[in-house]
Image (cartoon, helix red, strand yellow):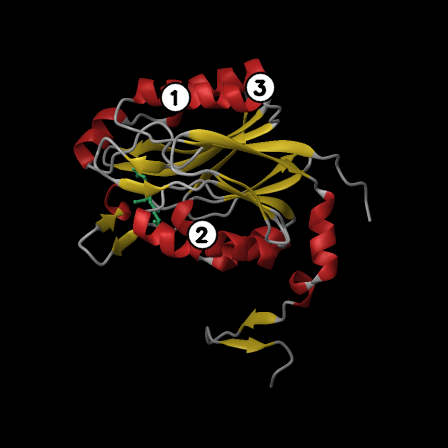
Amino acid sequence: MGMTAAPFKAACVQLRTGRNVQENIEAASALIRAAHGAGAQFIATPETTSLMELKADVLFATCVEEAKDPALLAFRQLAEELSVWLLVGSLALRVAPDKVVNRSLLIGPDGSLKARYDKIHMFDVDLPGGESYRESKNYRAGTEAVIADLPWGRLGLSVCYDLRFPYLYRQLAKTGASFLTVPSAFTQKTGEAHWHVLLRARAIETGCFVIAPAQGGTHENGRQTYGHSLIISPWGEILAEAAQEPTFILAEIDPAKVAEARSRIPALDHDRAVLAPSGAFKASGEA
Ligand SMILES: O=C(O)CNC(=O)[C@H](CS)NC(=O)CCC(=O)C(=O)O
């Protein structure tokens, strides 16, 4: 075994983002400062930290390209001031006149941008009871998985609905991730049914820490999100959990737990799944 990094403190900031970008930046910044005050060296915010609105007119009247985004600028300054690693769960950033991306951004303690990941899986779903989403109408889906180096190991990035596609996380873990971020705005109903079990499953399957900051409560645009930000160990234990109000949660992360969980159950090494040319799955070695 190589050298394992020392333990560190990670935090999730939980938000109830509204329609006013400046107010949203201020609310997030106050909680980032509080998490830093409690000792967090890595802090993550939820999906759509600076604006919670799916309607095209509001989205396109508000969203600008990455280089001009006021939230990204403010968070880069804050990360540098506090000297923390900051994962801005996501920002809606303009990439075409009628398209934004749902982009997760990792900022280093010097304020520089270390990684960007565009949400791959679009939430185009009709829920029982009439709730309906067409994320792909205004959002352009990403096409590439992204992994980034932290001082404590590698981080695999993802966003919200990506959580339902386990092969993304498998691939991130096989590429060396020890930590996975899943910034989210889960619906109340699907959150109640699936949030904890999916996040714990991803942690257990990959032997990674899962850090999942969430939106929670009833938002200005009428949407209700589930909250329950979670930090989960590679063995699947819940280390910290929020309720539904804006807050932050904090957990000590011991990177040695990654190797420990994977040595107890070496499922990542035992994985024999190969994709046959037909597209069907078969076990390697099968005729
Ligand atoms: O664009 C915004 O304002 C915020 N973004 C979201 O709310 C996104 C896309 S609609 N939500 C999800 O992916 C929920 C997934 C989910 O709830 C599930 O998988 O069950």
Mark earlier in primary sequence (2, 1): 1
- The image quadrant that residue 270 belongs to is bottom right
Quarter of the C terminus within the rendering:
bottom right
The answer, for residue 139, to whether it is visible in the render is: no
- In the foreground, 84 or 115: 84
Q: Helix, strand, or loop for circle 1?
A: helix
Is residue 223 shown left or right of residue 11?
A: left
Residue hosting label 2: 163
Q: Residue furthest top?
A: 81
In space, the residues marked 2 and 1 are separated at their CA atoms by 26 Å
Residue hosting label 3: 37
- In the foreground, 35 or 146: 35
At which x and y percent is residue 89?
45, 35
At which x and y percent is residue 92?
34, 33
Q: Is mark 2 within 8 Å of ligand 1?
A: yes
Q: Amino acid at mark 3?
A: Gly
Q: Residue at x 31, y 22 (%)?
A: 21
Labels 2 and 1 touching (C-beta < 8 A): no
Q: Amino acid at mark 1?
A: Ala
Residue hosting label 1: 27
- In the foreground, 126 or 68: 126
At which x and y percent is residue 94?
31, 31
Which circle, 3 or 2, is nearer the viewer?
A: 3
Q: Helix, strand, or loop for circle 2?
A: helix
Mark earlier in primary sequence (1, 3): 1
Q: Helix, strand, or loop for circle 3?
A: helix
In space, the residues marked 3 and 2 are separated at their CA atoms by 30 Å
Q: Amino acid at mark 2?
A: Leu
